[in-house]
Image: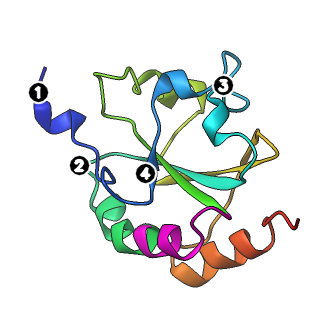
Amino acid sequence: MDDLYCVNFYDNTNVIELKRNDFNKKKTGFVNKKYIGINGIIVFYSNLCLHCKNTYNTLINIADMYKNKFNIYTVNCNNLEYKNDYLIRDFQITQYPQFKLINNNKINKLKLKNHNIENIMYIIDNNLKTK
């Protein structure tokens, strides 16, 4: 297996890299209990995609700002080691990066006109859980 495809952009950051087995069988939410309870955005990306590389700093900055309040999750769809390539079909990924919203452990479509920090923060501010 070519190691280039398995390299995750966001290891060792506050962005949470997901694997196929973090999702429930129906791919409607998480099975991993440590991710349940905090809303977030899931970004499906390819580590070979220029647009994905351009969103790197934005996602890291947002993850740092909202740590423990709202999570930024990512899935490297090229990571064959974790069988993440199956998630392309499961989540109907048609372009990279593709964003999904996870709210109350339910994954929903998320349309962003562009991936700038203001648009992402607007989504986050409208989906923060208040305690």
Q: Position of residue 27 (x, y in %)?
A: 67, 25
Chain-order first, disc 2 or disc 4: 2
Chain-order first, disc 4 or disc 3: 3
Q: Position of residue 29 (x, y in %)?
A: 71, 32
Q: Which residues are magenta?
A: 60-69
Give the distance between the C-alpha atoms of the residues marked 1 and 2, in whole angstroms. Answer: 13 Å
Amino acid on which disc 2 is placed = Leu
Query: Which residue is denoted by mark 3 in the rendering?
Result: 31
Give the distance between the C-alpha atoms of the residues marked 4 and 1, in whole angstroms. Answer: 20 Å
Query: Which residue is denoted by mark 1 in the rendering?
Result: 2
Residue visible at 38% across and 20% down in the picture: 83
Give the distance between the C-alpha atoms of the residues marked 2 and 3, in whole angstroms. Answer: 28 Å
Q: Is residue 39 above or below residue 113?
A: above
117, 91: nearer the viewer: 117
Mark 3 element type: loop
Give the distance between the C-alpha atoms of the residues marked 3 and 1, in whole angstroms. Answer: 29 Å
Q: Residues within 10 Å of mark 3 (few under 14, many from 20)?
A: some
Q: Residues within 10 Å of mark 1 (few under 14, many from 20)?
A: few
Amino acid on which disc 3 is placed = Val
Q: Residues within 10 Å of mark 4 (few under 14, many from 20)?
A: some
Query: Which residue is denoted by mark 4 in the rendering?
Result: 96
Say which of marks 2 and 3 sits in front: 3
Chain-order first, disc 1 or disc 2: 1
Say which of marks 4 and 1 sits in front: 1
Q: Are marks 1 and 2 in contact (CB under 8 Å)?
A: no
Give me the disc on residue 48.
2
